[in-house]
Image: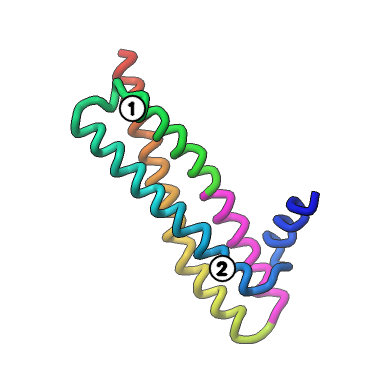
Amino acid sequence: MYLINTVKDFSKGKSAGITYLVLGFVISIPLGLASLRIDRRLDILAGYDVLEYSHRALVYGLASGILLLITLVFLAAISSGILGYFKKNSGLGRWVLLVLAIVHAPITSFTALVYGTSILRVGGAIIRHIH
């Protein structure tokens, strides 16, 4: 119950500004690096013409789906939280967080697009294999 309340407070802007700053970097960097790694692995599998026959490709597609969901939830929670923090607080810190959120949103959206592309590639390979 404590974790649920903490996440609710986080998404409503009730957390400390440093929390948004730290979590923005701590969570988004691994998500972005993982998306690039999965995409690169799928490129390698496709280069060997084994994407359609590879169980590894299915695992990467499933991982992409899970990480896409995490990325979208994280983007929504941190964006909502920073907007709430901006409205409730005053000072320079709120402006810094708002600017970082504006820069962060397209980068995280790009990460989500890379995950979505990986899912589509694996899905297309499955369809080609079935037919």
Q: Which type of secondary structure does the marked residue at label 1 adopt?
A: helix
Question: Image height check: is 129 above or below 43?
Answer: above
Q: CA distance from mark 1 to mark 2?
A: 37 Å
- Identified by mark 1, the residue type is Gly
Q: Position of residue 24 (x, y in %)?
A: 53, 64
Region in magenta: 71-89
| Up-down relation of residue 90 to residue 98 (above or below) | below
Q: Is residue 94 left or right of residue 61?
A: right
**Total marks placed:** 2
Q: Check residue 63 for magenta coloring.
A: no
Query: In the current view of this chain or complex, which residue is farthest to the top?
Result: 131
Residue designated by label 2: 22
Residue 102 x/y as whole percent:
49, 68
Of the numbered discs 1 and 2, the one sitting upstream in the chain is 2
Residue wearing tag 1: 124
Query: Residue 64 placed where, x, y %?
Result: 44, 39
Label ID, residue 26 = none
**x and y percentages locating residue 41 in the rendered image:** 30, 39
- Residue 70 shows up from this direction: yes
> What colouring method underlies this structural image?
rainbow
The residue positioned 29% from the left and 44% from the top of the image is 40
